[in-house]
Image: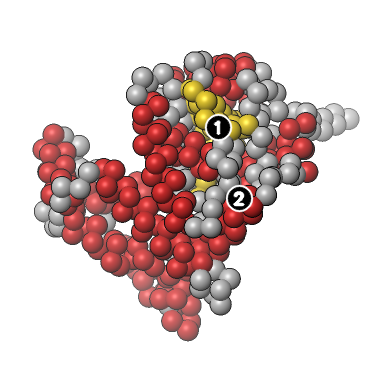
């Protein structure tokens, strides 16, 4: 059950609209601000896809959808929100401007999450003069309304209590929050994706394969394994009865072999862009982006549903979370939600100051 009474979304692009969809479909009212004159249409398109996917997940009926309000200003959007998700473009100057305005007008106890893909929260907090302690990175993955992972990262000024409340908030809307232990650019997910992306660019540029062939290698091979185990558990199994130690002993020497161009980057010029874009157009076989989104969503629902039936019906990995989430949505659809103790705590808690470090005793 959600612990959010009212949410605000700042930015209605692909990610921002995905947050809006997940929140609304959990029965939460959302106030959104986006200066783009096409924002309403774009959010509406994402909502169509999200509703379609959720009807597949919970055929018995969904909770009453939250109310969506398009605010004229950031101040209006965040005025009475207890959870705010910022999803503006990846420019630090723009983040500073938007977060400063959110900080000025949002209630003191509202948690502020940023969807940034790689900017450190410490670098964003400097713009928040009132309550920088309530900012966390809440980095999702597209489509936000279906993929459950959210990376939570705190900055130098973030209170530990804010991270805990953020974890509760994201978990309450069916997500899998993972707190990143140390603050680094691009966090964990995008660090891994960037490594694979760099290598992929070389493979295409050097004519080793086409974009479709590379994608086939991922989706017909290790992508299926990663969907339900992840890298390290997959390699543990690959080590046979001796497990991870045997795998590392066997394949550890490969790290010194010339298997990667990871530390080098191909020149990102018009020729490379044209090559990849043309091959990508061919790969799509005339399907529009909206048609590809429907195919993607259908596949994700089917994969998570299949995983939810594994492990003797308990579910495995994302499937176990999916099983719990669809049950939660069904319960919300069956009865009117009652505010939880966590919701009351999040709404009424006062900002807690960090404990002062004990002063060092003078020698002598």
Q: Is residue 153 above or below residue 177?
A: above
- 72 vs 163, nearest the viewer: 72
The single residue placed furthest to the right in the displayed view is 364
* Residue 284 as seen in the image, left or right of residue 241: left
Q: Please identify the quadrant where the C terminus is shown.
A: top right
Q: In which quarter of the image is residue 113?
A: top right
Residue 71's x, y, as percent?
A: 51, 20
* Among the two numbered marks 2 and 1 on one chain, the one whose residue lies closer to the N terminus: 1
108 relative to 283, above or below: above
Q: In this view, does 210 lie to the left or right of 155?
A: left
* Residue at the spot 51% in from the left edge and 63% down from the top edge: 319
Q: Nearer the viewer, residue 50 or 283?
A: 50
Q: Position of residue 95 (x, y in %)?
A: 47, 23
Residue wearing tag 2: 333
Q: Are marks 2 and 1 in contact (CB under 8 Å)?
A: no
Residue 274 place in picture, x, y as percent: 12, 39
In the rendered image, the residue lying farthest to the bottom is: 241
Say which residue appears at 59% left-offset and 22% top-offset: 78
**Compared to 125, does 175 lie above or below?**
below
In the image, which disc is placed on residue 67? 1
Q: How crowded is mark 2: few (under 14 residues within 10 Å), some or many (20 or more)?
A: some
Number of numbered discs visible in the structure rendering? 2
Left or right of 290: which side holds 308? right
Residue 43: x percent and y percent? 41, 33
Residue 7 tag number: none
Query: Which residue is more in the foreground, 346 or 248?
Result: 346
User: Picture quarter containing residue 228?
Assistant: bottom left
Give the quarter of the image for residue 169: top right
338 to the left or right of 166: right
The answer to which of 47 and 88 lies nearer the viewer is 47
Query: Please, is residue 261 above or below residue 31 in the view?
Result: below
- Dot 2 falls on a residue whose secondary structure is helix
């Amino acid at each position: 059950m959600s612990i959010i009474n009212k949410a605000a979304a700042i930015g209605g692009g692909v990610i921002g609209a995905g947050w809006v969809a997940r929140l609304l479909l959990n029965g939460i009212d959302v106030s959104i601000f986006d200066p783009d004159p096409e924002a309403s249409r774009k959010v509406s398109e994402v909502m169509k896809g999200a509703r379609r996917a959720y009807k597949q997940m919970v055929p018995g009926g969904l909770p009453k959808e939250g109310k969506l309000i398009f605010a004229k200003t950031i101040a209006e959007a965040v005025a009475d929100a207890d959870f705010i998700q910022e999803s503006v473009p990846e420019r630090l100057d723009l983040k500073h401007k938007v977060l400063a305005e959110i900080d000025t007008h949002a209630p003191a106890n509202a948690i502020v999450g940023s969807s940034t893909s790689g900017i450190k929260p410490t670098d964003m907090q400097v713009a928040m003069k009132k309550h920088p302690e309530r900012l966390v990175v809440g980095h999702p993955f597209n489509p936000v309304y279906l993929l459950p992972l959210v990376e939570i990262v705190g900055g130098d000024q973030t209170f530990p209590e804010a991270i805990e409340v953020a974890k509760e908030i994201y978990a309450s809307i069916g997500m899998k929050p993972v707190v990143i232990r140390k603050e680094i650019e691009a966090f964990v997910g995008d660090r891994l994706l960037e490594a694979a992306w760099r290598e992929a660019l070389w493979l295409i540029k050097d004519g080793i394969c086409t974009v479709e062939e590379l994608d086939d290698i991922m989706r017909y091979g290790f992508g299926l394994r990663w969907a339900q185990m992840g890298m390290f558990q997959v390699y543990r199994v690959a080590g046979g009865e001796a497990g991870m130690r045997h795998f590392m002993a066997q394949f550890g020497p490969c790290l010194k072999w010339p298997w990667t161009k990871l530390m080098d980057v191909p020149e990102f010029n018009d020729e490379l862009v044209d090559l990849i874009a043309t091959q990508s157009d061919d790969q799509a076989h005339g399907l529009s982006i909206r048609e590809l989104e429907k195919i993607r969503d259908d596949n994700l629902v089917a994969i998570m549903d299949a995983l939810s039936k594994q492990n003797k019906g308990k579910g495995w990995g994302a499937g176990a979370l999916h099983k719990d989430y669809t049950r939660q949505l069904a319960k919300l659809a069956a009865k009117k939600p009652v505010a939880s103790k966590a919701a009351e705590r999040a709404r009424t808690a006062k900002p807690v100051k960090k404990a002062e470090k004990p002063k060092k005793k003078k020698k002598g």
